[in-house]
Image: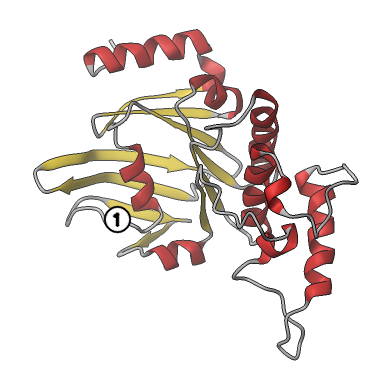
């Protein structure tokens, strides 16, 4: 299967600090990959390179998107390629309505160029039932986002990315601060990304959450890939044991 994203021998330094060293990472359409590791393992740096916020070191590796080599990837170009990030802060306007949040910055217009409010409300209604799973009569396109639960807000951000044809959705600590029921809802949204045939990188400190939805897990430690596992081939207990060993010793064995 062709990878949607492939990173080869990625290295990144900040002054004398080597944040990443020869990291290889790839993800295919319809795949959920969990990215795990302690603080300082290099997860954030790797994601910032994927999203164009940071550049690899000169001669510090190659990035391919759908088989095409990408050089000098910028934030705007990453977004044009279909790379979207949903941060733990959720980046939603709490005091705005649901439909405004879905289309903020990418408003639909009529053929004359006027903002098409009716169409945006109509599309939001479809998304609510078809993708977001909102069945409550209390939730409508004109509902203010502030009234939503944390899991529902994350869902809105994910569905917004899918609606605008994101090919790769990065979830950065999406379960932080969520209740058990909200987390369950969020994990259902992650499964929806996979069902839509899109790729998802799932970063979370909670190994249980990642394991429950990921096809594959990549463990980073001190800027290198310490291990990579298919979740079907490893139990949660085995994975946690390996991560503990990496944290203690820097290697798996």
Would you say 207 lies left or right of 95 here?
left
Give whichever of 83, 68 is nearer the camera: 83
Would you say 27 lies left or right of 128 here?
left
Of helix, strand and loop, which one carries label 1?
A: loop
Would you say 51 lies left or right of 31 here?
left
Which residue is rendered at x = 50% and y = 14% of the image? Answer: 234
Find residue 50 and report its horizontal and vertical position in percent.
39, 51
Which residue is rendered at x = 54% and y = 37% of the image? Answer: 174
> From the viewer's perspective, is residue 89 above or below residue 214?
below
Find residue 139 and report its horizontal and vertical position in percent.
83, 48
Find residue 159 and report its horizontal and vertical position in percent.
68, 51
Q: How many marks?
A: 1
The residue identified by callout 1 is: 54
Find residue 154 and report its horizontal and vertical position in percent.
62, 43
The part of the image, by quadrant, that contains residue 30 is: top right
Which residue is rendered at x = 57% and y = 19% of the image? Answer: 232
Give whichever of 179, 28 is nearer the camera: 179
Give whichever of 117, 147 is nearer the camera: 147
* Label 1 Cα neighbours within 10 Å, binned few <14 / some 14-19 / many ≥20: some
The part of the image, by quadrant, that contains residue 223 is: top left
Q: Residue furthest bottom?
A: 112
* Quadrant including the C terminus: top left
Q: Residue 252: in sight, yes or no?
A: no
Would you say 136 lies left or right of 44 here?
right
Q: Residue furthest left?
A: 16
């Amino acid at each position: 299967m062709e990878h949607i994203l492939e990173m080869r021998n990625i290295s990144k330094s900040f002054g004398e600090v080597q944040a990443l060293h020869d990291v290889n990472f790839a993800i295919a359409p319809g795949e959920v990959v969990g990215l795990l590791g302690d603080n300082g393992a290099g997860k954030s740096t790797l994601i910032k390179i994927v999203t164009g916020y940071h550049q690899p070191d000169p001669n510090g590796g190659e990035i391919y998107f759908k088989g095409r080599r990408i050089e000098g990837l910028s934030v705007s170009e990453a977004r044009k390629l279909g790379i979207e990030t949903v941060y733990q802060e959720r980046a939603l306007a709490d005091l705005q309505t649901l439909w405004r949040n879905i289309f903020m910055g990418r408003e639909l217009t009529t053929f004359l160029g006027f903002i098409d409010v009716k169409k945006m409300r109509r599309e939001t209604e479809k998304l609510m039932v078809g993708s977001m799973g909102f069945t409550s009569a209390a939730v409508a396109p004109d509902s203010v986002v502030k009234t939503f639960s944390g899991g529902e807000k994350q869902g809105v951000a994910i569905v917004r990315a899918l609606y605008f044809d994101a090919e790769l959705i990065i979830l950065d600590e999406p379960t932080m601060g969520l209740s058990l029921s909200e987390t369950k809802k969020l994990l259902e949204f992650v499964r929806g990304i996979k069902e839509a045939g899109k790729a998802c990188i799932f970063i979370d400190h909670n190994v249980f959450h990642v394991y429950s939805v990921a096809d594959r897990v990549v463990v980073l430690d001190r800027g290198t890939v310490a291990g990579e596992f298919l979740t079907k081939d490893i139990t949660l207990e085995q994975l946690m044991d390996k991560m503990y060993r990496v944290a203690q010793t820097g290697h798996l064995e």
